[in-house]
Image (tube, rainbow, N blue to C red):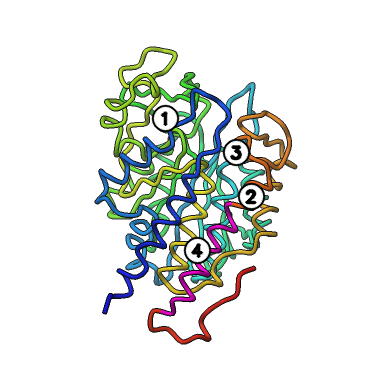
Amino acid sequence: MKSDATQLAPYFDYLDQIANLELKNRPSQQGGTAIRYHIARQRQGNRPLSEKVAETLLPRLNGGTVILTTGTGNPLWLPDGETDGPSGVAVLTRVFGSLGIRSCVLAEARFLPGVRAAVRAAGTPLLDEHSWPYRSNGALCLPFPTGAEAAPGFIDALLSSRQDWTAAFFIEKPGPGIDKQFHNGSGERKDAGWLAHAHSLASAARKQGMPTVGIGDGGNEIGFGVIREALFREAPHRFGCQCGCATGMLDSTLVDVLLPASVSNWGAYAVAAALALRLWQRELMPGWSEVADSIRAPIEHGAFDGYTGLALPSVDGISLRGNRAVYHLLEEVLDLAMTTRIGKPAAMIQPGR
């Protein structure tokens, strides 16, 4: 008889495939999703990456605190952030809270209002520094200071403030290339002084033995250092930049697991589904109404869709209807897996929402 893990393997594959369903309307970006995912999977054990994230976290899911970092933009186009990233953080924060794990959410001060609103919209209570340590299901949102000089002190104080750090996530968070230059998804240079140097947190967390997870959709985000050389070698024309850096727009930060996705939010949703599948807890997934609210919420605080530049509840040019379809497909995978029972009682099977 096949083991539970063997029987579940196809479902993790489905989660990865859904998170990497490419819906790009820019010719220059079409086809890149498959390249990123294929190389990332090949270089990380040739297995579903959502499953790899879940299994990396499982031994540490006994309480504690998770760090989740997001927030991106630029002074002219996205001064208050975008709709990709906050919702992914919000869904994972909700899942971790359901497991009795508190969340520490980090973003630049200019992006933090939208991120806070997304986390709250998904149902996680936002707490202050006095009450947060006493609640296992809440989130503390802190501003990550900008510029290289501010990062070390902030990171040292953060990591020394607790002994129960469980993992660190970097979702749609830009990281620098080997030339220490930051870029956006179009290969344009970002002002390093305008950004939080969260890649330094990834390095510090790894040194402390904390699992680190990068989720991104372009190659310029924290975590793509895992496949930077292979990716640039495979398609240098696709991942070049507009300023002539040696390896183009690609981030150089190493993490323990990199999950590329078509949309970063979708990668985070897939991780949430993978945890629900691996723990056999269908109810961990928030309902779509909360997820939809977490996409809308940052717009009220100045965020835009990063592709269209419009203050609409779309993500990377994909409508709310499209995001709903993707989320429901992830839920469908869980429902299909639950019907296999795999030795579990029928009472544990949850109906789709």
**Mark 4 or 3: the one toward you:** 4
Dot 4 or dot 3: first in sequence order is 3
Q: Nearer the viewer, residue 304 or 324?
A: 324
- The residue beneath circle 1 is 149
The percent position of residue 184, horizontal first and vertical second, equals: 49, 26
State which region is magenta: 326-341
User: Quarter holding the C terminus?
Assistant: bottom right
User: Of tags 2 and 4, which is closer to the observer?
Assistant: 4
Q: How far apart in space, not on screen, are marks 4 and 1 (Cα)?
A: 45 Å
Do callouts 1 and 3 mark residues in contact (Cβ within 8 Å)?
no
Q: Which residue is mark 2?
A: 116
Earlier sequence position, callout 3 versus callout 2: 3
Q: Which residue is mark 3?
A: 109
Tell which circle, 1 or 3, labels the residue nearer the N-terminal end.
Answer: 3
Above or below, 196 relative to 328 = above
Q: Amino acid at mark 2?
A: Arg
Query: Sequence order check: which comes first, mark 4 or mark 1?
Result: 1
Looking at the rendering, which quadrant does residue 83 occupy? top right
Q: Tell me how far mark 4 sits from mark 3, CA to CA.
A: 37 Å
Q: Earlier in the sequence, mark 1 or mark 2?
A: 2
Other-residue count near label 4 (Cα within 10 Å), few / some / many at <14 / 14–19 / ≥20: many
